[in-house]
Image (cartoon, coloured by chain):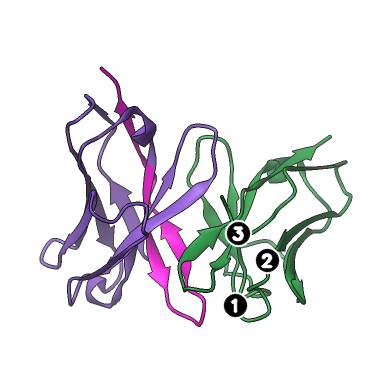
Chain colours: A purple, B green
Amino acid sequence: QVHLVQSGAEVKKPGSSVKVSCKASGGSFSSFIISWVRQAPGQGLEWMGGIIPTSGTTVYTQKFQGRVTITADEYTNTAYMEVRSLRSEDTAVYYCARELVGATNWFDPWGQGTLVTVSS
Amino acid sequence: SSELTQPPSVSVSPGQTARITCSADALPRQYGHWYQQRPGQAPILIIYKDTERPSGIPERFSGSTSGTTVTLTISGVQAEDEADYYCQSADSSGTLVFGGGTKLTVL
């Protein structure tokens, strides 16, 4: 059974960067797509983008293109999501999830989430 | 703004049936999926491909589809079902999108 474990909470200053990790176990990482989903305080879920670890192919939503970078390390079964030029609006819980392919892709399972707080 | 429209809230008494709808023009051509998110927890998948239920999800959770609407039905609602529920699909460009979420209150 696939299990995703994320890195711990972060507090960052505006203008800085944050890199969140997501380590997979219990499955073949090389066959995964790993996606990242953001949830601002009291708000809904927002898909940011994803990566195919075997090829390094990434896709980002327009909102996050250029400011977010998703990478993966097949040797450690770990995916990473970096956000640069942080602003207060980036304060959110960031989730990684395995994206399953099937006409309309879906997410299962999810990591436990990483709270990123941006504050001066 | 979300392209999937859900009611902000639904309230039911224990033992009753809760129905949560999710509407979008793209749904006749795309599958809908559903997630449950309890307070302070990560979402979990409860329905995929409109009607399929992952192993371990109670049978009281079911999904259906009709035209531009997918519906999550919870039969015999229990107190532990109180949570936020999100539908998810894809828009016309293939971007994965979520509904705004529905807060289920068990009275």
Q: Please rate how many residues cluster around mark 2, counting C-alpha atoms within 10 Å: few if below 14, some from 14 to 19, many from 20.
A: many
Quarter-of-image position of residue B70: bottom right
Residue B24, which numbered label?
2
**Which residue appears at 43% of the width and 78% of the height?**
A101
* Magenta residue check for B60: no
Q: Which residue is mark 1?
A: B30
**Which residue appears at 68% of the width and 74% of the height?**
B51
Q: Residue A113: x, y in percent?
A: 38, 43
First in sequence, mark 1 or 2: give its number: 2
Q: Main secondary structure of the magenta part?
A: strand
Instruction: Kindly report the distance in space between the C-alpha atoms of the residues bearing marks 1 and 3.
Output: 13 Å
What is the secondary structure assignment of the residue under circle 1?
Answer: loop
At label 3, which amino acid type do we have? Glu
Task: Pinpoint the chain carrying mark 2.
Answer: B
What is the secondary structure assignment of the residue under circle 2?
Answer: loop
Q: Tell me, yes or no, whether dots 1 and 3 are on the same chain.
A: yes
Q: Residue B54: x, y in percent?
A: 58, 69
Q: Please rate how many residues cluster around mark 1, counting C-alpha atoms within 10 Å: few if below 14, some from 14 to 19, many from 20.
A: many
Q: Please rate how many residues cluster around mark 3, counting C-alpha atoms within 10 Å: few if below 14, some from 14 to 19, many from 20.
A: some
At label 1, which amino acid type do we have? Gln
At label 2, which amino acid type do we have? Ala
Disc 2 vs disc 3: Cβ atoms closer than 8 Å?
yes
Depth check: give the residue in front, B66 or B25.
B25
First in sequence, mark 2 or 3: give its number: 3
Disc 1 vs disc 2: Cβ atoms closer than 8 Å?
yes
- Quadrant (top left/top right/bottom left/bottom right) for the C terminus of chain B: top right
Q: Which residue is mark 3?
A: B3
Task: Pinpoint the chain carrying mark 1.
Answer: B
Highlighted magenta segment, given as a residue range: A94-120
